[in-house]
Amino acid sequence: MFAIRSDDGYREILDKIQLKTLIHGKKTLMAEFRIGKGALLPRHNHPHEQIGYLVSGRLQLTIGEETRTVEAGDSWCVAGHVEHQAAALEDSVAVEVFSPVREDYLP
């Protein structure tokens, strides 16, 4: 299966945060997030393991009780059911993989 790059298919999930599912299989889903400077992803958790890569920008990311500033090229992993949040210090683009597939992110 292949997915060809397109600027279509983004949807706003929170103020200044857009999501696009890039591709998914039976066990994993990969999504791109466009995050505007000043956006806040509130503290939350879900059963999915989440692995992320910051393509561009800077985020303040909290996983559990640990907070770090992540920059382009940095990665992270959030275990299922662990609380996490993010604040955009700059306009940012992140790519994240979820397992199992997040049904709410399917196109």
Image (cartoon, grey):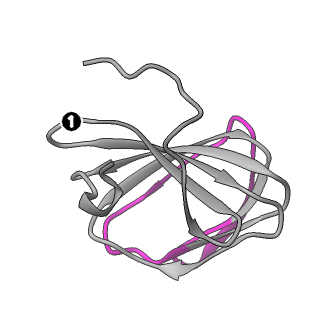
For badge 1, the amino acid type reads: Gly
Magenta-drawn stretch contains 63: yes
102 lies left or right of 63: left
65 lies left or right of 87: left
Instruction: Using the rendered view, name the quadrant where residue 21 is placed.
Output: top left
Magenta-drawn stretch contains 46: no
- Residue 76 picture location, percent across and down: 54, 50
- Residue 42 picture location, percent across and down: 59, 80
The quadrant of the picture occupied by the N terminus is: top left
Q: Which residue is mark 1?
A: 25
Residue span colored magenta: 61-84
Q: Residue at the spot x=49%, y=43% of the render?
A: 9
Identify which residue, 81 or 8, lies in the foreground.
Answer: 8
Identify which residue, 1 or 64, lies in the foreground.
Answer: 1
Q: Residue at the spot x=49%, y=46% of the render?
A: 20
Q: Residues within 10 Å of mark 1 (few under 14, many from 20)?
A: few
Residue 78, placed above or below residue 83: above
Residue 96, placed above or below residue 11: above
- Residue 16 picture location, percent across and down: 71, 65
66 lies left or right of 50: right
Report the number of discs. 1
- Residue 61 picture location, percent across and down: 66, 65
Q: Residue at the spot x=54%, y=37% of the render?
A: 8
- The secondary element bearing badge 1 is classed as loop
State the residue lying farthest toward the left: 26
Instruction: Using the rendered view, name the quadrant where residue 18 is placed.
Output: bottom right
